[in-house]
Image (spheres, helix red, strand yellow):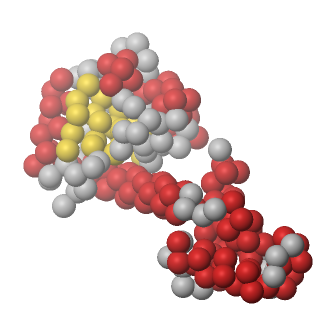
């Protein structure tokens, strides 16, 4: 069954298409939200919204391609699928350059639609899992004292207890005590896990 935390946001000014797609996805167990234009959707969407966006290329006001750019500008990272009855190679290229998951030409088969939705939501699940991991890493690292964080950073550089002790002006025994506490607080079973945690935290900081 589709995840309950994910929503398929359907944006199409053609009520018949909008309702038909919403009904089909609802039958398949997907949670949906329907909008007649991009501006109404943009008024409702939040950076924390999760799922995927199914948007018509030609919309009154903000177009589907403009919507993609605006979502990116706002930091809304949900995957986007563009649907259109007026598609061409140039439009498709522009959509994919803006990171669209798929570009569906109307009328499309239900199997095409479901394949695109499944692909988009699988991508979204991977993104959310990564964000969950980042939040968990941040929470775990926050348990450390400033001294434990210093010891951890030196461990991640591959230094041994004696080297860390010399660098921080403490005894190797004290380093080992800190290391044991760090592993307990971070629920780590090995030095490799400590290193992986530090590397992920550094990558997360570099992405901001």
Task: Point out residue 107 in the picture as x, y percentages from the top left corner.
Answer: 26, 38
The answer to whether 186 is drawn above or below residue 115 in the figure is below
Residue at the spot 52% in from the left edge and 35% down from the top edge: 75
Q: Estimate the x, y position of residue 43 in percent, counting from the top left.
A: 36, 20
Q: Is residue 139 visible?
A: yes
Picture residue at 67% right of the left edge, 77% below the top = 178
Q: Nearer the viewer, residue 168 or 20?
A: 168
Left or right, 181 with reference to 81: right
Is 131 displayed left or right of 191 in the figure?
Answer: left
Query: Between 68 and 4, which is closer to the camera in this rendering?
Result: 4
Number of marks in the image?
0
Asked if residue 86 shows in the view, the reply is no
User: Residue at horizontal 40%, vertical 39%?
Assistant: 48
Which residue reaches farthest top? 61
Q: Is residue 170 above or below residue 133?
A: below
Q: Is residue 123 left or right of residue 197?
A: left
Q: Quadrant of residue 22?
A: top left
184 to 53, vertically: above or below: below
The percent coordinates of residue 109 (x first, y second) are 23, 48
Q: Quadrant of residue 144?
A: bottom right
Location of the C terminus (image quadrant):
top right
Left or right of 158? Residue 35 is left
Q: Residue at the spot x=53%, y=43% of the render?
A: 99
Image coords of residue 194 (percent x, y): 63, 75
Q: Quadrant of the N terminus?
A: bottom left
Q: Is residue 64 above or below residue 102?
A: above
Q: Front-most of 81 and 129?
A: 129
């Amino acid at each position: 069954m589709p995840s309950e935390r994910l929503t398929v946001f359907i944006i199409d000014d053609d009520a018949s298409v909008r309702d038909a797609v919403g009904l089909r996805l609802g039958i398949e167990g997907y949670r949906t939200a329907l909008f007649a234009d991009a501006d109404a959707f943009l008024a409702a969407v939040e950076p924390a919204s999760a799922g995927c966006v199914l948007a018509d290329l030609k919309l009154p006001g903000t177009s589907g391609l403009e919507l993609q750019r605006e979502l990116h500008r706002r930091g809304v990272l949900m995957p986007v699928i563009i649907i259109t009855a007026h598609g061409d190679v140039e439009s498709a290229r522009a959509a994919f350059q803006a990171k669209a998951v798929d570009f569906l030409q109307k009328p499309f088969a239900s199997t095409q639609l479901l394949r695109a939705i499944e692909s988009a939501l699988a991508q979204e699940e991977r993104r959310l899992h990564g964000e969950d991991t980042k939040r968990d890493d941040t929470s775990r690292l926050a348990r450390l004292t400033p001294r434990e964080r210093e010891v951890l950073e030196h461990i991640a550089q591959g230094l041994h207890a004696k080297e860390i002790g010399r660098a921080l002006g403490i005894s190797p025994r004290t380093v080992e005590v800190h290391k044991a506490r760090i592993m307990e607080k971070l629920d780590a079973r090995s030095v490799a896990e400590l290193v992986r945690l530090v590397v992920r935290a550094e990558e997360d900081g570099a992405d901001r």
